Amino acid sequence: MKVLVVGSGGREHAIVASVARSPRVNKIYCAPGNAGIGELAECVPIPAMDIAEMVAFAKEKEIDLTIVGMDDPLVAGMVDAFEAQDLRVFGPRKNAAIIEGSKAFSKDLMKKYNIPTASYETFMSAEEAKKYLETSEYPIVLKADGLALGKGVLICNTKEEAIDGVKSIMEDKKFGSAGNKLVIEEFMTGREVSVLCFCDGKTIKTMTSAQDHKRAGDGDTGLNTGGMGTFSPSPFYTEEIDAFCREHIYQPTIDAMAAEGRPFVGVLFCGLMITPKGVKVLEYNARFGDPEAQVVLPRMKNDIIDVVEACIDGRLDEIDLQFEDNAAVCVVLASDGYPVKYDKGFLIEGLDKFKDNEGYYAFHAGTKQTAAGVVTNGGRVLGITAKGENLHKARENAYAATEWISFDNKYMRNDIGKAIDEV
Ligand code: AMP
Ligand code: GLY
């Protein structure tokens, strides 16, 4: 079968690697892809947001299955466009991807269906938002309603910071039209965990848990990034917490979306906070996490094509989803200066070593193939993942493997997975 994967990051590299393991697949395309993906798939230079071109390509090549990895094309309706042409595609339709595309929508959904989340108010004008901030408690959280590359959330410690935040999101439009609406939310404390779930519109099955590290610097300091590393499973996500989430979060979310006439088919990413007052939903995403996919998918025992097809065909209940009884850690190698300002175009050395070492992966995020070799081409360059029999071993292996790679302005956090020492 011929499979097309849409996207170009480390997450899509992990998806393509899973697809490549399926004996059912004999040809993989990825649009637009990257240098690492190019070793497993034929990369096609179609921008991920060019829905019309993507559909035309899938028709021309008679693609049997398309997997959309990224959020923007999902929110823009790529799945609907494929379905309109009778093309088989995995991901939520536009009316379901809104669960990620609009924070106001997802908050209202949770409120309506009693799904635990932080209390909040939604504002359409900066003036009203500022008035509300006069009597709020601090810290407080501001969220631009729409997609903002994971950067539309501001945690404000004082009223002054919050008023500045409202100004930058709603008046200066720092995140463009994503800031036309604003959600102001109660600040929660606790440990975060990401649980990715396969969904077929009525059945939801959770994958193994993971924890991301969003801040740029060690000890969770510095700016928010797309994610600097992950570990899986999360030892803080206990069986008791899992049971609570099944009853109060996962199935209720899928049922709520179905009841709203927006059946969710695809991967639902539940960003959870384990607070002293119980588990609450921080956010939903409508796709695999990045870099969560890089620690979750290498541990999945099932053929990803079987699972994806079961989702599309509404028979996920027949799938026995299984993960290896081990652990994985992903350390992101970034360009020094990310997420603000950084140089790129530096030669990357050491990639070959990953080919001969099972259980080790160099997932490409921002790389480019040139005549001289593979060079850096983004803020997050590579996700170095290693498995191990337990989290400690996986972390040791992943950090050892980061040493195999060199490029000029290589930067990484040195404390990915450090939290496991607290267990
Ligand atoms: P989001 O894009 O909604 O996941 O937010 C990005 C990050 O901001 C989350 O991973 C949390 O670390 C933090 N965050 C979001 N909402 C809250 C909240 N209500 N309280 C505390 N931290 C939050
Ligand atoms: N790692 C967070 C995300 O994919 O949104």
Image (cartoon, grey):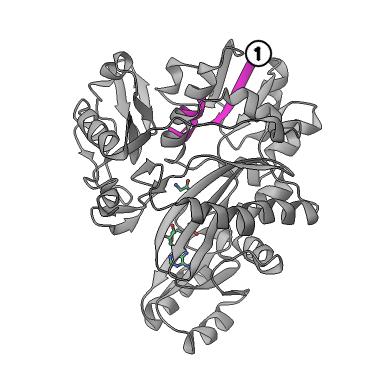
Residue 354 vertical placement versus 241 (above, below): above
**Image quarter (top left, top right, bottom left or bottom right) of the N terminus:** top right
- Range covered by the magenta-colored residues: 1-16
**Residue 264: x percent and y percent?**
70, 45
- Please give the name of the residue rendered at 54% of the width and 21% of the height, measured from the top-left corner: 19
- Rendering coords of residue 135 (x, y %): 49, 89
Tell me if 412 is positioned left or right of 171 in this view.
left
Which residue in the rendered view is the most extreme toward the front? 240
Residue type (three-letter) at the residue carrying disc 1: Met
Q: Is residue 154 above or below residue 314?
A: below
Residue 247 placed where, x, y %? 63, 56
Ligand 1 image-quadrant field? bottom left
- Farthest residue in the bottom direction? 135
Name the residue located 79 percent from the left edge and 55 percent from the top edge: 259
Residue drawn at (57%, 59%) of the image: 178
Q: Residue furthest top?
A: 26
Q: Quadrant of residue 406?
A: top left
Would residue 182 be counted in the magenta stretch? no
Q: Is residue 15 magenta?
A: yes
Name the residue nearer the viewer: 16 or 378.
16
